[in-house]
Image: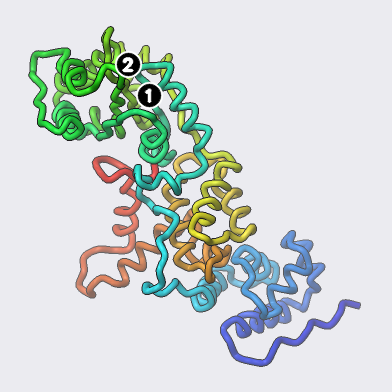
Amino acid sequence: MPRRERPLDAGDSALLRFARDLRLLRERAGSPTYRELSAETHYSPAVLSQAAAGRRLPSLQVTRAYVRACGGAEDEWEERWREVAAELEPPEPAAEPGTSPYVGLAAFRTEDAERFFGREALIRELVSRLGEHRVVVVVGASGSGKSSLLRAGLVPSWPGPVVLFTPGAHPLEECAIHLGRYAGAPTDPPAEDSRWLHRSVRRVVPDTTELVFVVDQFEEVFTLCRDQGERVRFIDQLLTAARAGNSGCRVVLGVRADFYAHCTTHPDLVEVLRDGQVTVGPMTADELRLAVVQPAVRARCTVETALVTRIVAEASGQPGVLPLLSHALLETWRRRRGTTLTLAGYEAAGGVEHAVAHTAEAVFADLPPNGSASPSSCSCASARSGRARRTPSAG
């Protein structure tokens, strides 16, 4: 005969009401034992019993499994679970000191290098490849972390000077502007001088030094630059400067994988793609653990083991997930319990799949009543942050 369930503590808190109603749901389902529920849900009887014990909020997954096994409405219970989670895990007060260890949807910047974790092996590969080849192309899917790798990985790790820029609509002008900033004097590219960049670099860089041009979002030469002649001249200037006999520079191009074929239309880029390519793939499970845990450690926070396990299960091997994961971690940090990032906080934020939408809905709720935006348009605007001309997302 199964043991009698321990009575709930006295009180009328949201957590106790939640547990009380879970028990009532099970009773209406015919009072199946927790062992019988376990056979249906694949959670242990102890986990299911604790879900209705009223001492702590069960995870959303356990709650949904419990409700499903008892014939309840999962979506209604999920909404209720989120309400209780929000009451138990409110966002930290704005006045509390501390900067988030996670950057959200934006790409890591060079100054974020100390909190950029998980790509150490890829950084070493990129630095090594750049030491062997004068031109390197970094290729990866949107959201794979190319921009972060270049800005917070390569730039701080490379021992020499770096000029980093995105090409925009007029890549030669952008190159000239950023080289001028490095040199401390403006420089304009002559229209007919095919060795302008090489000569300019040689004038401003000592013979014992090599300058590295890092062109992030190189696909902009195809999407934003409408002048094919300027596009070809820009590519030729870069490759000529890097390959000249007394070259004073090396070149790194970061390009989205869906523009790989565009690069193959330039004969000299084909050779670079064959010999000097570095591919940015999805993070492995070990890399994800580092990316999740180490920034928190640096901020003197801890991450629940259950949260790390969930994130690894959801994001490992998934292409393009890094900006969404970074945003979910930022929102989880805002819902932390003291100095601990919790699974409950992550689920309340919406996790990898829904955190952006939840944030967009919160922004929409704060708009004036006659505002013309909608939650979906806010969400789409957030999602589009990784595309076209913008401050780079985490990809």
Displayed quadrant of residue 190: top left
Of label 2 and label 1, which has the lower sequence position? 1
Viewer-nearest residue: 259 or 330:
330
The reply to whether dot 2 and dot 1 touch (C-beta < 8 Å) is yes
Neighbor class of circle 1 (other Cα within 10 Å; few <14, some 14-19, many 20+) is many
Q: Which residue is mark 1?
A: 137
Can you tell which quarter of the image residue 217 is in?
Answer: top left
At a point 47% along the width and 63% down the height, the residue shown is 333
Height in image: 283 above or below 226?
A: below
Q: Around disc 2, counting alpha carbons within 10 Å, would you say few (fewer than 14), some (14 to 19), or many (20 or more)?
A: many
104 or 67: nearer the eye? 104
- Dot 1 falls on a residue whose secondary structure is strand
For image coordinates 19% across by 29% down, the residue present is: 179
Q: Amino acid at mark 2?
A: Leu
Image quarter where the N terminus lies is bottom right
Distance, label 2 to label 1, CA atoms, is 9 Å
Residue 60, given in percent of the width and then of the height, sits at 59, 66
Residue 225 visible in the picture: no
Q: Which secondary structure, mark 2?
A: helix
Residue in view at x 35 percent, y 49 percent? 106
Residue 318, x across and y down, in percent: 52, 41
Circle 2 is placed at which residue position?
269
Q: As displayed, is residue 186 above or below residue 353?
A: above
Q: Amino acid at mark 1?
A: Val
Residue 295 spot, x, y in % from top left: 49, 52
Q: Is residue 230 above or below residue 382?
A: above
**Seen in the image, is 169 located left or right of residue 345?**
left
